[in-house]
Amino acid sequence: IDSATGFEPGRRQVIILKLAVEPDTLNGTYNLTIDDSVTTRQTAGRKGEFLTASYTAGSIEITDATPPVTISGRVLTPSGQGLRNATVILTDEQTGERRVTTTGSFGRYRFENVGSGSTQVVTVRAKRYRFMSRSFTITATLRDVDLIAME
């Protein structure tokens, strides 16, 4: 890192690393070590003189390594017709966070950016029909999750 003004003695942030996380990486803490395998460590002063520097190992906390997914489908009457204006509620079992949407003309609904690895409960509210809630542990995008009225 070249700097005409230099740095004052002490600890300074001089680099920011952006790392891509592979989709199958598990959540957790991972050690980060800087070594000489790519380039030799050298720190120089303003006049080009070599300075003593220490490199501190650290760690990276991965809390959501999996990409968000989508849950979509239709809300249907017992005869298989799409139910318009039904309220679909998606609840995260762990956090209690609720998301709500209303079905369109053909009974379609969609929730985007759902956390993979979470357990979600889908509930439907409609004036003339009753529905059983359904629970899913989300590992990938779910399409055609149709919710059919009981009566």
Image: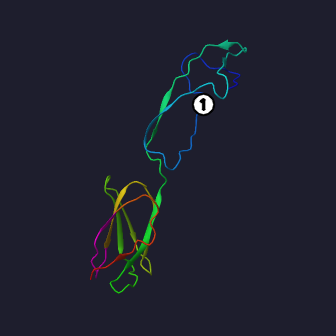
Residue at far bottom of view: 79
Residue at far right of view: 47
Residue 25 in sight: yes
Q: Amino acid at mark 1?
A: Ile
Q: Quadrant of the N terminus?
A: top right
Q: Residue at x 31, y 56 (%)?
A: 93
Label 1: which secondary element: loop
Residue 110 in sight: no
Q: Quadrant of the C terminus?
A: bottom left
Answer with the quarter of the image where residue 110 lies: bottom left
- Residue range of the region highlighted in magenta in the rendering: 125-135
Residue named by callout 1: 15
Query: Measured from the top left, where is residue 97 in percent x and y?
Result: 34, 56
Residue 132 counted in the magenta span: yes
85 or 64, which is in the foreground?
Answer: 64
Q: Is residue 17 above or below residue 120?
A: above
Answer with the quarter of the image where residue 105 lies: bottom left
Q: Is residue 58 above or below residue 28?
A: above
Asked whether, in this view, residue 110 is left or right of residue 97, the answer is right
Q: Residue at x 53, y 45 (%)?
A: 21
Answer with the quarter of the image where residue 120 lies: bottom left
Q: Is residue 87 above or below residue 48?
A: below
Asked whether, in this view, residue 101 is left or right of residue 35, the answer is left
